[in-house]
Image: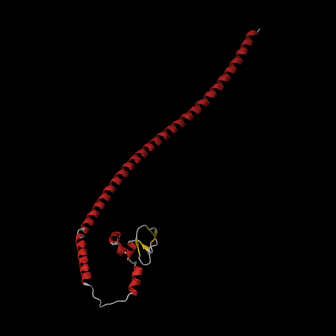
Amino acid sequence: MNSNCKKCNEKVQDGAQCSRCKLVYHYYCVALSEVGWRRLGSERKASWLCPNCKSNAQLNSPRNTTQCKPIEETKAESTSLENIEAMLASLSGLPVLVEKLRNEVSELNARFSSQVIEELNTRLDDIEAKLSSVESLKIEQNKLITKLNTHEDRFIKLDKDLKQQIEETTDLHKKMKLLEREYNRSQQFPER
């Protein structure tokens, strides 16, 4: 029974079909329960009318207000009424049961919520600890960068000083060689 419900126009997998117009309805769209529909005999299902067809049938049928009901029909109605009263009596404890279920659901929600909150708090604590660790590492990194920059500056200064020393040493070396040559020359030609 894969067709659309005449009332809500949505797909019907399982529903009630009118015996006159053959249209299909969801049970809840025509104020039927699925259980109630299943309890109807095959004859009653075969003669079931949708609200539109039922109202049309009532308008077209002649009314006899003086008609008396047969005794069997009255007995069946009173038996049916007794059955309904018995069913209602069996449902008298339903409000207490519903309240119990509500309380249990509330308790479960509270328990679940507290577990979730506890787990979230634990995770947040872990994240905060990791962030603190990262911040400490960042501080250490900055200190190392500062030290490295200081050492680099010192290295540049030392390198500059070394180059200057090398230049001075080279100059001194040249002067010494020059002086040596002059001395050697002067030794070769003594003064007379």
Protein image colouring: secondary structure
Residue 148 lies, in percent from the top left, at 53, 36
Q: Is residue 176 above or below residue 32?
A: above
Q: Is residue 34 visible?
A: yes
110 vs 134, nearest the viewer: 110
Q: Residue at x 34, y 52 (%)?
A: 118
**Quarter holding the C terminus?**
top right
Q: Which one is nearer the viewer's eye here, 154 or 10?
A: 10
Image quadrant where one finds the N terminus: bottom left
Question: Position of 156 compared to 39: left or right?
Answer: right
Residue 135: give x, y in percent of width and height.
Answer: 45, 44
Identified at 66% across, 22% down, the residue is 172
- Image quarter of residue 27: bottom left
Tell me where residue 47 sits by quadrant: bottom left
Residue 148 vs 169, above or below: the answer is below
Q: Residue at the location (33% across, 56% down)?
A: 112
User: With 146 as the anchor, is 124 left or right in this view?
Assistant: left
Work out whether residue 190 can be spotted.
Answer: no
Farthest residue, direction bottom: 66
Residue occupying the point 31% across, 56% down: 111
Question: Where 24 falls versus 181 (above or below)?
Answer: below
Q: How many marks?
A: 0
Question: Which quarter of the figure has residue 105?
Answer: bottom left
Q: Nearer the viewer, residue 30 or 133?
A: 30
Q: Position of residue 163 (x, y in %)?
A: 63, 28
Can you give x and y, in whole percent of width and height, for residue 87 in the image? 25, 72
